[in-house]
Amino acid sequence: MKPSVYVETTIISYLVGWLSRNDLQVAAHQELTRRWWATRKGEFELFASSIVIDEAGDGEVALAAERLRFLRDVKLLQVPAEAHVLKSELLRRTQIPAKAENDALHIAVAAVHGMEFLSTWNCKHIANAVTLPLVYEVCRAEGYEPPIVCTPYELMGEAYEEV
């Protein structure tokens, strides 16, 4: 069985549009995400949620349509009441701010559904080394094994050295 990956919205966003010319780090993340999607995504079972669909559908119409096209290859998870309860606990007991409610909900959905990984480029509120230990602690205290939060770079596996 393939490892499960919850694909957060930044992954889908980085697959679409022009490479950033103003921010070399964003351009590198975009290129790496595209390489991972093209060469490695088949090694994982990919999941998202209606939260990802909603966020990916925002913005310029043509780009939103392209983002939603990429999501056709991804299985959709329900956002159950348990995920909202866990989200509330994450907001209350970690450094994730209330304005980042959807970020906490991405983590909660992935945890409630038993995802092995949550892939994101959101290093401010999700893939944050300062915040994650407490996020993992809260998930476990609420009865869920949290997903390993990582970037596509960390999911490159054997191709890691080629990046």
Image: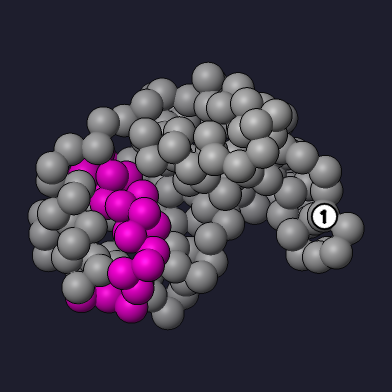
Q: Nearer the viewer, residue 41 or 24?
A: 24
Residue 2 visible in this rendered orientation of the protein: no
The one of 98 and 60 positioned closer to us in this rendering: 60
Residue at the right extreme of this rendering: 21
Q: List the residue tagged with mark 1.
A: 20
Residue 149 part of the magenta segment: no
- Residue type at the position of mark 1: Ser
Measuring from the top left, give residue 116's x and y in whole percent: 36, 44
Colouring of the image: one colour
State left or right for residue 49 relative to residue 158: left
User: Is 109 one of the magenta-colored residues?
Assistant: yes
Residue depicted at 46% across the width and 74% down the height: 129
Query: Which region of the structure is painted magenta?
Result: 93-114
Q: Main secondary structure of the magenta part?
A: helix
Which residue is found at the position 27% from the left and 75% from the top? 94
Question: Is 82 displayed left or right of 110 in the figure?
Answer: left
Above or below 50: residue 160 = below
Q: Where residue 4 sits in the image (x, y, percent)?
A: 40, 35
| Residue 153 in sight from this viewpoint | yes
Q: What residue is drawn where x is 62% and y is 26%? A: 65
Q: In the figure, 65 relative to 117: above or below?
A: above
Secondary structure type for disc 1: loop
**Measured from the top left, where is residue 140 in percent x and y?**
17, 61
